[in-house]
Amino acid sequence: MTGPTKDSNNDIAKSCTTPVDCGGASCINGKCQASTTPTNNQTQPNNQTSNNQTGETCAKRALCGSCDVSCQVGTVGPSSGTPFDIAADGSGGVVLDADGHITLEAPGTAGASHYVWIANTGQGTISKVDSRTYEEVARYLTGPHGTSNDPSRTSVNNYSDVYVGNRSGMSVTKIANGANCRDRSGDGIINTSTGANDVKPFGQDDCVLWNTPLTDGGIIRAIAAQDGSDGPVVWVGGWNGVIWKLDGETGQILVRTTAPHAPYGFALDKAGNLWIATYPNSRLARLDTNRCTDSQSCNAEPVCDDTGDTCVKQIINLPAGAYGITVDFKQRVWLGGNLMRYDPAAPPGQRIVLVNPGAFIHGIAADDKGWIYGAGYNQGMYRVEADNPNNWAIVAGTAQQSVKGIAVDLDGKAWGINYGHNNALVVQPGAGLNDGQVIHTQAGFVSPYTYSDMTGSQLRFATNRRGIFVRTFEGCAPAHFVYNEWEELHFTSDVPAGATITMRVRVANARDQLAQAEWIDVAELPSTASPVNLKAILEPLNLHRSQFIQVESQLNALSEGDVVAVPVLKSLSVRSECPPILL
């Protein structure tokens, strides 16, 4: 095709596909333009908006240095005309603030996650229940062995995905909350359960991501999700005294080590300590996940006793038996059984408070208001004042109920899982000890022997808040350009002292290949300045020329007492170089 000349009015009106067809002028909406830069407010590839017919600068000039057609920019953020979309690409734990910027979700907000994952132990399944509407939105098989899966322990990560431990099935399964479900068949449809009566065969539900057998450590008794700076992992405990660390994305075993004591339950604090409940022995154990990174480091020193606060592994003697376990937002460890509080920051000899309320407490959970909830099987649901544990009461309407498990949802309601009644009691707490009431009974479960963190509140309340925003950008159309070369990553943000935003990227030539690509670390805010030279990072790996780039921004808050430093991501842009094909 012969391109038009700029001084030919007839040629200017010609149809075009690329700027090359216009002899140097711009091609917008299929027509050659009179200027070499696009007309006012015309949308360009990768969400560019330009305005230069009157001599004003085009929008991409700030990032490109010119309005050259070979420079392409993709931008998201409220000031760009393309708002952030937290529902796409597998983001989790983040919301939009009043200005449309990315920030971390807070419990009780409109955007906060609102699902409860309840294991149907007698059926070999797990139910996903909307904690606001009380609708059971899905039910999944938790392993390949049907009712012999024997699911019980659960842990929910910051994406609201669940890891479920199959006790006698001796395996762990990860199930996606929604955004991370994978189209296995490639038919463009997520084939997944739609409710209690729609349980797909194992291996055929696109939201069941992986299953990892763990057959060399006994019955699976403990599980805890951890979303760290190196990506998501999950810790799993076997009754025969084994602890595994699995890759949260793939289920691959990263670490296998001897537990300081046979695990019965796990809970993490914000320092990275994995606290371990034992049963029936009167012991509390601890594993430092920051120092236990491989088999050698995990076993580099002997297991310490009560005085070994700086050891990798520790066993602490208790005055009574334990059972369930949680950690509150003040970093105190709470144990079921005879109901105890262990404060690792208190002086030795003053760390343990034994409550002994007259019932054996099974599951235990903490909220973010200073209350502890205990499952007193056949006695009811107990509410305990965390700062004064001897101030406790049985919640009205729960007496004589078979409460096995306890969970607090992210709106602050307490869920009591009735193993013997195949239902769950939902309690709306009040300000005072006796101000709670049962507002709903959720029926339809099958022997729900479940009492670990089933909402993600333990991870969110006890550890520093963390969330992920993911955005996929597409490069220049390959039919019209020689190549697409990723050049720079630009961003604006507000990162207060102590908070961070870490960024990593992965690239592929097809969108559906991104999930298999390796992540590459590129920035940590606030220390990294914008822009980041992507080409310098990607070219040595021969990854700089590709069609798609996915940018993950992990927002990490810092909580110190009543002070919470929360980061905000305001805009995100990628710049690429695209030499046009000359015809």
Image (cartoon, helix red, strand yellow):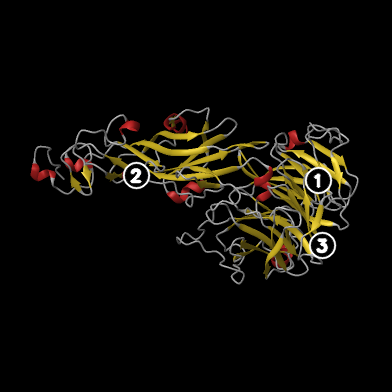
Q: Nearer the viewer, residue 467 or 494?
A: 494
Determine which residue is flagged by label 3.
377
Q: Tell me whether the residue at label 2 lies in contact with that at label 3, contact meaning CB atoms closer than 8 angstroms.
A: no
Mark closest to the chain's N terminus, 2 or 1:
2
Residue assigned mark 1: 388
Q: In the visual, does 24 lie left or right of 198? A: left
> Which one is closest to the eye, mark 2 or mark 3?
3
Mark 2, residue position? 47
What is the x, y in percent for residue 559? 64, 37
Q: Element under label 2? A: helix
Position of residue 507 measured from the top left corner of the image (x, y, whole percent): 45, 41
Instruction: Name the residue at 62% across, 63% down.
Output: 129
Mark 3 / mark 1, whichever is N-terminal:
3
> In the picture provided, is 439 more to the left or to the right than 42?
right
Q: CA distance from mark 2 to mark 3?
A: 57 Å
- Taking depth in this image into account, of 100 and 417 the one nearest to the observer is 100
Cβ–Cβ under 8 Å for marks 3 and 1: no
Name which residue type carries label 1. Asn
User: Residue 96 versus residue 31: which sits nearer the camera?
Assistant: 96
Label 2: how many Cα within 10 Å (few below 14, some 14–19, many 20+)? some
- The amino acid type, in three-letter code, at marker 3 is Tyr
Mark closer to the chain start, 2 or 3? 2
